[in-house]
Image (cartoon, rainbow, N blue to C red):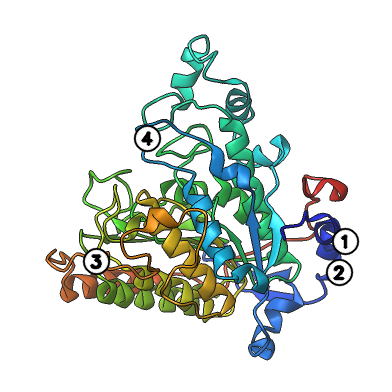
Amino acid sequence: MISSDHTAAAASSSTYSSVFNSSYSSSSSSSSSSSSTAHIPPSVALANLTASAKTRVTYFYNETSAKFHYGEDHPMKPARLALAHNLIVGYGLHRHMDTYMQRRATEDEMIEFHSEDYIELLKRVTPDNVQSLEKFLNRFNVGVEDCPVFEGMFDFCRLSCGGSIEGARKLCVGSDIAINWAGGLHHAKKFEASGFCYTNDIVLGILQLLRIYPRVLYIDIDVHHGDGVQEAFYQSDRVMTVSFHRFDGSFFPGSGALKETGVKAGLNYTVNVPLNENIDDESYAYVFRGVISNVMETFRPHAVVLQCGADSLAGDRLGCFNLSVRGHGACVEFVKSFRVPTLVLGGGGYTIRNVARAWAYETSVCVGVDVPDALPPNDYYAHFRPDFRLHAPIVAKDLPNANPRHLLDAILAQIADQLRHVAAAPSVQMVEIPPDLVPCDDAAE
Protein backbone atom coordinates (compact mmCIF):
# COMPACT_ATOMS: atom_id res chain seq x y z
CA MET A 1 0.00 0.00 0.00
CA ILE A 2 1.16 3.51 -0.77
CA SER A 3 0.76 5.87 2.16
CA SER A 4 1.11 9.64 2.46
CA ASP A 5 4.34 10.89 3.95
CA HIS A 6 3.03 12.93 6.86
CA THR A 7 4.87 11.46 9.82
CA ALA A 8 8.37 10.98 8.44
CA ALA A 9 8.46 14.21 6.48
CA ALA A 10 7.05 16.15 9.40
CA ALA A 11 10.21 15.38 11.30
CA SER A 12 12.49 16.60 8.53
CA SER A 13 13.09 20.15 9.77
CA SER A 14 14.01 19.12 13.27
CA THR A 15 16.17 16.32 11.88
CA TYR A 16 18.14 18.85 9.84
CA SER A 17 19.31 20.37 13.12
CA SER A 18 19.91 17.11 14.98
CA VAL A 19 22.11 15.55 12.32
CA PHE A 20 24.53 18.47 12.34
CA ASN A 21 26.69 17.00 15.06
CA SER A 22 29.73 16.02 13.03
CA SER A 23 32.07 18.19 11.03
CA TYR A 24 33.92 18.00 7.78
CA SER A 25 37.05 20.02 7.10
CA SER A 26 37.31 20.85 3.43
CA SER A 27 40.25 22.29 1.62
CA SER A 28 39.57 25.36 -0.41
CA SER A 29 39.49 25.55 -4.14
CA SER A 30 42.30 27.46 -5.81
CA SER A 31 40.45 30.73 -5.37
CA SER A 32 40.46 30.45 -1.58
CA SER A 33 43.48 30.68 0.70
CA SER A 34 42.06 28.95 3.78
CA SER A 35 40.01 25.87 4.56
CA SER A 36 36.38 26.06 5.67
CA THR A 37 34.24 23.78 7.75
CA ALA A 38 30.84 22.29 7.01
CA HIS A 39 28.77 19.77 8.90
CA ILE A 40 27.47 16.51 7.46
CA PRO A 41 25.13 13.83 8.82
CA PRO A 42 26.56 10.93 10.79
CA SER A 43 25.11 8.62 8.11
CA VAL A 44 27.78 9.91 5.72
CA ALA A 45 30.66 9.85 8.18
CA LEU A 46 29.81 6.29 9.23
CA ALA A 47 29.05 4.93 5.78
CA ASN A 48 31.90 2.43 5.89
CA LEU A 49 30.83 1.14 9.31
CA THR A 50 27.30 0.38 8.10
CA ALA A 51 28.21 -1.21 4.78
CA SER A 52 26.67 -4.52 5.80
CA ALA A 53 23.37 -2.98 6.85
CA LYS A 54 20.33 -3.52 4.67
CA THR A 55 19.77 -0.82 2.07
CA ARG A 56 16.79 1.36 2.95
CA VAL A 57 14.98 2.30 -0.24
CA THR A 58 12.20 4.86 -0.54
CA TYR A 59 9.88 4.81 -3.56
CA PHE A 60 7.51 7.51 -4.82
CA TYR A 61 4.57 7.02 -7.15
CA ASN A 62 1.28 8.74 -7.89
CA GLU A 63 -1.03 7.20 -10.47
CA THR A 64 -2.03 10.69 -11.62
CA SER A 65 1.47 11.17 -13.06
CA ALA A 66 0.79 8.45 -15.62
CA LYS A 67 -2.48 9.95 -16.86
CA PHE A 68 -1.20 13.07 -18.63
CA HIS A 69 -1.07 13.21 -22.40
CA TYR A 70 1.34 15.34 -24.43
CA GLY A 71 -0.53 14.65 -27.65
CA GLU A 72 -1.30 11.79 -29.99
CA ASP A 73 1.89 12.00 -32.05
CA HIS A 74 4.21 13.22 -29.31
CA PRO A 75 6.91 10.68 -28.33
CA MET A 76 6.72 11.48 -24.60
CA LYS A 77 4.19 9.11 -23.03
CA PRO A 78 3.69 9.50 -19.27
CA ALA A 79 1.75 6.21 -19.35
CA ARG A 80 5.16 4.51 -19.23
CA LEU A 81 5.14 5.26 -15.49
CA ALA A 82 2.08 3.05 -15.03
CA LEU A 83 3.71 0.23 -17.00
CA ALA A 84 6.84 0.42 -14.86
CA HIS A 85 4.89 0.64 -11.60
CA ASN A 86 2.77 -2.39 -12.50
CA LEU A 87 5.90 -4.46 -13.09
CA ILE A 88 7.42 -3.23 -9.82
CA VAL A 89 4.30 -4.22 -7.89
CA GLY A 90 3.88 -7.43 -9.91
CA TYR A 91 7.34 -8.52 -8.88
CA GLY A 92 6.55 -7.63 -5.26
CA LEU A 93 9.39 -5.11 -5.08
CA HIS A 94 7.20 -2.61 -3.22
CA ARG A 95 7.40 -4.92 -0.20
CA HIS A 96 11.10 -4.17 0.05
CA MET A 97 10.71 -0.37 0.01
CA ASP A 98 9.13 2.42 1.99
CA THR A 99 6.47 3.53 -0.48
CA TYR A 100 4.93 6.99 -0.57
CA MET A 101 2.47 8.88 -2.67
CA GLN A 102 4.35 11.40 -4.77
CA ARG A 103 3.23 14.85 -3.67
CA ARG A 104 2.88 18.10 -5.60
CA ALA A 105 5.63 20.67 -5.24
CA THR A 106 4.55 24.13 -4.18
CA GLU A 107 5.16 27.22 -6.28
CA ASP A 108 7.58 28.50 -3.63
CA GLU A 109 9.63 25.33 -4.00
CA MET A 110 9.66 25.59 -7.78
CA ILE A 111 10.92 29.18 -7.79
CA GLU A 112 13.94 28.09 -5.78
CA PHE A 113 15.33 27.54 -9.28
CA HIS A 114 12.82 28.73 -11.87
CA SER A 115 11.84 32.36 -12.36
CA GLU A 116 8.54 33.50 -10.86
CA ASP A 117 7.14 34.74 -14.16
CA TYR A 118 7.92 31.44 -15.86
CA ILE A 119 6.16 29.44 -13.15
CA GLU A 120 3.24 31.87 -13.30
CA LEU A 121 2.89 31.22 -17.02
CA LEU A 122 3.00 27.45 -16.57
CA LYS A 123 0.27 27.80 -13.94
CA ARG A 124 -1.98 29.98 -16.10
CA VAL A 125 -1.71 28.52 -19.60
CA THR A 126 -4.19 25.87 -20.78
CA PRO A 127 -5.15 24.50 -24.19
CA ASP A 128 -8.16 26.86 -24.08
CA ASN A 129 -6.24 30.13 -23.60
CA VAL A 130 -3.02 29.31 -25.43
CA GLN A 131 -3.66 31.79 -28.26
CA SER A 132 -4.19 34.74 -25.92
CA LEU A 133 -0.85 34.03 -24.22
CA GLU A 134 1.11 33.38 -27.40
CA LYS A 135 3.62 36.22 -26.99
CA PHE A 136 4.53 34.98 -23.51
CA LEU A 137 4.73 31.36 -24.66
CA ASN A 138 7.31 32.24 -27.30
CA ARG A 139 9.44 33.94 -24.67
CA PHE A 140 9.56 30.78 -22.56
CA ASN A 141 9.64 28.22 -25.39
CA VAL A 142 6.27 26.78 -24.37
CA GLY A 143 3.66 25.74 -26.91
CA VAL A 144 6.23 24.57 -29.46
CA GLU A 145 6.35 21.10 -31.00
CA ASP A 146 8.66 19.62 -28.34
CA CYS A 147 6.93 21.31 -25.41
CA PRO A 148 3.22 21.60 -26.21
CA VAL A 149 0.56 22.97 -23.93
CA PHE A 150 -1.57 20.06 -22.70
CA GLU A 151 -4.32 19.57 -20.16
CA GLY A 152 -2.95 19.47 -16.62
CA MET A 153 0.56 20.50 -17.66
CA PHE A 154 1.32 22.43 -14.47
CA ASP A 155 0.05 19.58 -12.31
CA PHE A 156 2.36 17.24 -14.22
CA CYS A 157 5.27 19.54 -13.40
CA ARG A 158 4.33 19.82 -9.74
CA LEU A 159 4.17 16.04 -9.34
CA SER A 160 7.50 15.44 -11.04
CA CYS A 161 9.20 18.08 -8.88
CA GLY A 162 7.47 17.03 -5.68
CA GLY A 163 8.70 13.44 -5.99
CA SER A 164 12.32 14.51 -6.47
CA ILE A 165 12.24 17.07 -3.67
CA GLU A 166 10.74 14.55 -1.25
CA GLY A 167 13.18 11.88 -2.41
CA ALA A 168 16.05 14.23 -1.60
CA ARG A 169 14.55 14.93 1.81
CA LYS A 170 14.37 11.22 2.54
CA LEU A 171 18.08 10.91 1.81
CA CYS A 172 18.69 13.76 4.24
CA VAL A 173 16.98 11.88 7.06
CA GLY A 174 18.20 8.33 6.67
CA SER A 175 17.19 6.64 3.42
CA ASP A 176 20.00 5.12 1.38
CA ILE A 177 18.22 5.28 -1.99
CA ALA A 178 15.14 7.23 -3.06
CA ILE A 179 13.39 6.50 -6.37
CA ASN A 180 11.19 8.85 -8.40
CA TRP A 181 10.72 7.48 -11.92
CA ALA A 182 8.51 10.48 -12.75
CA GLY A 183 11.54 12.74 -12.33
CA GLY A 184 14.72 13.19 -14.34
CA LEU A 185 13.50 15.93 -16.68
CA HIS A 186 16.96 17.30 -17.30
CA HIS A 187 16.52 19.77 -20.19
CA ALA A 188 14.37 22.42 -18.48
CA LYS A 189 16.11 25.74 -17.87
CA LYS A 190 15.52 28.47 -15.33
CA PHE A 191 13.48 30.56 -17.76
CA GLU A 192 12.31 28.10 -20.41
CA ALA A 193 11.07 24.68 -21.40
CA SER A 194 13.17 22.40 -23.59
CA GLY A 195 13.16 18.85 -24.90
CA PHE A 196 9.80 17.73 -23.42
CA CYS A 197 10.82 19.20 -20.03
CA TYR A 198 9.08 22.19 -18.43
CA THR A 199 10.49 22.22 -14.90
CA ASN A 200 13.77 20.77 -13.70
CA ASP A 201 13.00 18.47 -10.81
CA ILE A 202 16.64 17.36 -10.75
CA VAL A 203 17.96 20.82 -9.93
CA LEU A 204 15.31 21.22 -7.23
CA GLY A 205 16.27 17.85 -5.73
CA ILE A 206 19.96 18.78 -5.73
CA LEU A 207 19.21 22.12 -4.07
CA GLN A 208 17.40 20.21 -1.34
CA LEU A 209 20.39 17.90 -0.87
CA LEU A 210 22.75 20.87 -0.65
CA ARG A 211 20.95 21.99 2.51
CA ILE A 212 22.63 19.04 4.24
CA TYR A 213 25.39 17.62 2.05
CA PRO A 214 28.50 19.67 1.17
CA ARG A 215 29.04 17.94 -2.19
CA VAL A 216 26.57 16.34 -4.60
CA LEU A 217 27.42 14.32 -7.70
CA TYR A 218 25.00 14.29 -10.63
CA ILE A 219 25.26 11.38 -13.11
CA ASP A 220 23.22 11.27 -16.32
CA ILE A 221 22.93 8.15 -18.53
CA ASP A 222 20.24 9.49 -20.85
CA VAL A 223 21.20 9.36 -24.54
CA HIS A 224 20.76 13.15 -24.59
CA HIS A 225 23.08 15.55 -22.81
CA GLY A 226 21.89 16.75 -19.39
CA ASP A 227 22.19 20.38 -20.41
CA GLY A 228 19.68 21.91 -18.00
CA VAL A 229 21.41 20.51 -14.93
CA GLN A 230 24.85 21.36 -16.28
CA GLU A 231 23.81 24.96 -16.89
CA ALA A 232 22.32 25.31 -13.41
CA PHE A 233 25.56 24.31 -11.66
CA TYR A 234 28.15 25.37 -14.23
CA GLN A 235 29.76 27.82 -11.80
CA SER A 236 29.55 25.65 -8.69
CA ASP A 237 32.21 23.51 -7.02
CA ARG A 238 29.67 21.88 -4.72
CA VAL A 239 27.94 20.00 -7.54
CA MET A 240 29.82 17.94 -10.10
CA THR A 241 27.78 17.00 -13.18
CA VAL A 242 28.76 13.96 -15.25
CA SER A 243 26.82 13.23 -18.45
CA PHE A 244 27.22 10.24 -20.78
CA HIS A 245 25.48 11.01 -24.07
CA ARG A 246 25.47 10.94 -27.84
CA PHE A 247 27.37 13.91 -29.21
CA ASP A 248 28.18 15.02 -32.73
CA GLY A 249 27.41 18.73 -32.46
CA SER A 250 23.92 18.38 -33.91
CA PHE A 251 22.23 15.59 -31.93
CA PHE A 252 19.79 17.24 -29.48
CA PRO A 253 20.50 19.40 -27.54
CA GLY A 254 23.80 19.99 -29.35
CA SER A 255 25.83 20.54 -26.18
CA GLY A 256 28.01 18.24 -24.10
CA ALA A 257 31.46 18.42 -25.66
CA LEU A 258 34.52 17.35 -23.67
CA LYS A 259 35.69 20.96 -23.58
CA GLU A 260 32.63 22.06 -21.56
CA THR A 261 34.16 21.82 -18.10
CA GLY A 262 32.61 24.67 -16.07
CA VAL A 263 33.60 28.23 -15.30
CA LYS A 264 34.72 30.32 -12.32
CA ALA A 265 34.48 28.29 -9.09
CA GLY A 266 32.95 25.47 -11.13
CA LEU A 267 35.88 25.08 -13.51
CA ASN A 268 36.56 21.35 -13.98
CA TYR A 269 33.43 20.37 -12.06
CA THR A 270 31.50 19.66 -15.26
CA VAL A 271 32.41 16.35 -16.88
CA ASN A 272 31.07 15.38 -20.30
CA VAL A 273 31.47 11.97 -21.93
CA PRO A 274 30.56 12.40 -25.60
CA LEU A 275 29.83 9.09 -27.32
CA ASN A 276 29.10 7.92 -30.84
CA GLU A 277 26.12 5.87 -31.96
CA ASN A 278 25.48 2.19 -31.31
CA ILE A 279 27.62 1.86 -28.19
CA ASP A 280 27.12 -1.58 -26.64
CA ASP A 281 27.06 -2.89 -23.07
CA GLU A 282 30.75 -3.75 -22.90
CA SER A 283 31.99 -0.40 -24.21
CA TYR A 284 29.52 1.58 -22.10
CA ALA A 285 30.50 -0.28 -18.93
CA TYR A 286 34.18 0.32 -19.72
CA VAL A 287 33.85 4.08 -20.02
CA PHE A 288 31.21 4.43 -17.28
CA ARG A 289 33.23 2.54 -14.68
CA GLY A 290 36.42 4.34 -15.66
CA VAL A 291 34.92 7.81 -15.36
CA ILE A 292 32.78 7.24 -12.27
CA SER A 293 35.58 5.49 -10.35
CA ASN A 294 37.85 8.46 -10.98
CA VAL A 295 35.13 10.98 -10.11
CA MET A 296 34.22 9.22 -6.87
CA GLU A 297 37.85 9.06 -5.78
CA THR A 298 38.53 12.69 -6.68
CA PHE A 299 35.31 14.52 -5.81
CA ARG A 300 34.19 12.24 -2.95
CA PRO A 301 30.51 13.23 -2.99
CA HIS A 302 28.26 12.96 0.04
CA ALA A 303 25.18 12.32 -2.11
CA VAL A 304 24.51 11.23 -5.69
CA VAL A 305 21.68 11.98 -8.09
CA LEU A 306 21.45 9.38 -10.88
CA GLN A 307 19.32 10.18 -13.92
CA CYS A 308 18.38 6.90 -15.63
CA GLY A 309 17.03 8.08 -18.97
CA ALA A 310 16.00 4.92 -20.81
CA ASP A 311 16.36 6.33 -24.32
CA SER A 312 19.91 4.98 -24.21
CA LEU A 313 18.43 1.48 -24.56
CA ALA A 314 18.63 -0.34 -27.87
CA GLY A 315 15.63 0.19 -30.10
CA ASP A 316 14.48 3.43 -28.51
CA ARG A 317 12.24 5.54 -30.70
CA LEU A 318 14.53 8.59 -30.38
CA GLY A 319 17.80 7.02 -29.21
CA CYS A 320 20.81 5.64 -31.06
CA PHE A 321 22.65 3.54 -28.46
CA ASN A 322 22.58 -0.25 -28.30
CA LEU A 323 22.31 -1.07 -24.59
CA SER A 324 20.41 -3.96 -23.09
CA VAL A 325 18.23 -3.60 -20.00
CA ARG A 326 20.90 -5.42 -18.03
CA GLY A 327 23.66 -3.18 -19.40
CA HIS A 328 21.69 -0.05 -18.49
CA GLY A 329 20.99 -1.41 -15.02
CA ALA A 330 24.68 -2.19 -14.51
CA CYS A 331 25.24 1.56 -14.15
CA VAL A 332 22.77 1.68 -11.26
CA GLU A 333 24.43 -1.32 -9.66
CA PHE A 334 27.88 0.24 -9.96
CA VAL A 335 26.78 3.55 -8.43
CA LYS A 336 25.02 1.68 -5.63
CA SER A 337 28.26 -0.16 -4.82
CA PHE A 338 29.79 3.08 -3.49
CA ARG A 339 27.15 3.20 -0.71
CA VAL A 340 26.54 6.92 -0.99
CA PRO A 341 22.96 8.23 -0.49
CA THR A 342 21.48 8.20 -4.00
CA LEU A 343 18.43 9.78 -5.61
CA VAL A 344 17.42 7.62 -8.59
CA LEU A 345 15.33 9.35 -11.26
CA GLY A 346 13.76 8.61 -14.62
CA GLY A 347 14.27 10.72 -17.72
CA GLY A 348 13.95 10.04 -21.43
CA GLY A 349 12.70 6.81 -22.94
CA TYR A 350 10.23 6.53 -25.79
CA THR A 351 9.78 2.82 -26.49
CA ILE A 352 7.69 2.55 -23.39
CA ARG A 353 7.64 -1.23 -22.92
CA ASN A 354 11.44 -1.15 -22.70
CA VAL A 355 11.40 1.88 -20.41
CA ALA A 356 9.16 -0.08 -18.04
CA ARG A 357 11.45 -3.10 -18.22
CA ALA A 358 14.53 -1.02 -17.42
CA TRP A 359 13.04 0.89 -14.51
CA ALA A 360 11.51 -2.24 -12.98
CA TYR A 361 14.85 -4.05 -13.27
CA GLU A 362 16.72 -1.08 -11.81
CA THR A 363 14.28 -0.97 -8.91
CA SER A 364 15.17 -4.61 -8.23
CA VAL A 365 18.85 -3.65 -8.31
CA CYS A 366 18.22 -0.86 -5.79
CA VAL A 367 16.48 -3.17 -3.32
CA GLY A 368 18.87 -6.07 -3.96
CA VAL A 369 16.23 -8.59 -5.00
CA ASP A 370 16.65 -10.92 -7.97
CA VAL A 371 13.53 -11.14 -10.12
CA PRO A 372 12.68 -13.75 -12.76
CA ASP A 373 12.93 -13.03 -16.45
CA ALA A 374 9.29 -13.98 -16.99
CA LEU A 375 7.14 -10.89 -16.48
CA PRO A 376 4.47 -11.08 -13.78
CA PRO A 377 0.80 -10.82 -14.77
CA ASN A 378 -0.23 -7.17 -14.68
CA ASP A 379 -2.72 -4.70 -16.12
CA TYR A 380 -0.44 -3.90 -19.07
CA TYR A 381 0.77 -7.40 -19.86
CA ALA A 382 -0.22 -7.19 -23.54
CA HIS A 383 2.22 -4.30 -24.09
CA PHE A 384 5.15 -6.69 -23.63
CA ARG A 385 4.33 -9.12 -26.39
CA PRO A 386 5.59 -11.23 -28.04
CA ASP A 387 8.12 -12.52 -25.46
CA PHE A 388 6.74 -11.21 -22.14
CA ARG A 389 10.26 -11.14 -20.69
CA LEU A 390 12.11 -8.61 -18.56
CA HIS A 391 15.32 -9.07 -20.50
CA ALA A 392 13.83 -9.20 -23.95
CA PRO A 393 16.32 -9.46 -26.88
CA ILE A 394 16.27 -5.76 -27.79
CA VAL A 395 19.95 -5.41 -28.76
CA ALA A 396 20.64 -5.23 -32.49
CA LYS A 397 23.54 -7.54 -33.33
CA ASP A 398 24.23 -6.15 -36.78
CA LEU A 399 24.88 -2.50 -35.79
CA PRO A 400 28.54 -1.45 -35.85
CA ASN A 401 29.70 0.09 -32.57
CA ALA A 402 31.18 3.48 -33.51
CA ASN A 403 33.08 3.68 -30.20
CA PRO A 404 36.41 1.84 -30.61
CA ARG A 405 38.49 1.25 -27.49
CA HIS A 406 41.17 3.75 -28.49
CA LEU A 407 38.52 6.49 -28.68
CA LEU A 408 37.17 5.60 -25.24
CA ASP A 409 40.72 5.53 -23.85
CA ALA A 410 41.33 9.01 -25.23
CA ILE A 411 38.15 10.27 -23.52
CA LEU A 412 39.16 8.64 -20.24
CA ALA A 413 42.62 10.18 -20.45
CA GLN A 414 41.31 13.67 -21.09
CA ILE A 415 38.80 13.43 -18.23
CA ALA A 416 41.50 12.08 -15.90
CA ASP A 417 43.64 15.09 -16.76
CA GLN A 418 40.70 17.41 -16.06
CA LEU A 419 40.03 15.79 -12.68
CA ARG A 420 43.62 16.34 -11.60
CA HIS A 421 42.71 20.00 -11.27
CA VAL A 422 39.79 19.28 -8.92
CA ALA A 423 40.39 19.77 -5.21
CA ALA A 424 39.35 16.67 -3.28
CA ALA A 425 37.18 18.80 -0.99
CA PRO A 426 35.74 21.91 -2.67
CA SER A 427 35.29 25.04 -0.63
CA VAL A 428 32.11 24.96 1.44
CA GLN A 429 30.63 27.51 3.79
CA MET A 430 27.47 26.46 5.66
CA VAL A 431 26.83 28.14 8.97
CA GLU A 432 23.16 27.31 9.25
CA ILE A 433 20.60 25.17 7.45
CA PRO A 434 18.02 27.00 5.34
CA PRO A 435 14.46 26.32 6.48
CA ASP A 436 12.17 24.06 4.44
CA LEU A 437 9.93 25.86 2.00
CA VAL A 438 6.99 23.59 2.82
CA PRO A 439 5.71 23.65 6.41
CA CYS A 440 6.25 20.31 8.09
CA ASP A 441 2.53 19.56 8.40
CA ASP A 442 2.09 20.02 4.64
CA ALA A 443 5.00 17.87 3.53
CA ALA A 444 2.78 15.38 1.66
CA GLU A 445 -0.59 15.45 -0.02
Instruction: Indicate the secondary structure of the residue bearing disc 1.
Output: helix
First in sequence: mark 4 vs mark 2: 2
Asked whether the residues under the numbered discs 4 and 2 touch, taking CB atoms below 8 Å apart as contact, a structural biologist would say no
Q: CA distance from mark 3 to mark 1?
A: 49 Å
Q: Could you tell me the amino acid type at mark 4? A: His
Quarter of the image that includes the C terminus: top right
Asked whether the residues under the numbered discs 2 and 1 touch, taking CB atoms below 8 Å apart as contact, a structural biologist would say yes
Question: Residue 74 has which mark?
Answer: 4
Label 4 environment density (alpha carbons within 10 Å; few <14, some 14–19, many ≥20): some
Seen at 52% across and 59% down, the residue is 378
Task: Please give the residue where the numbered disc 2 appears in the rendered image.
Answer: 18
Instruction: Indicate the secondary structure of the residue bearing disc 3.
Output: loop
Marks 4 and 2: which is nearer the front?
4
Question: Residue 14 has which mark?
Answer: 1
Q: Could you tell me the amino acid type at mark 3? A: Val
Asked whether the residues under the numbered discs 3 and 2 touch, taking CB atoms below 8 Å apart as contact, a structural biologist would say no
| Image side of residue 240 versus residue 207, left or right | left
First in sequence: mark 3 vs mark 1: 1
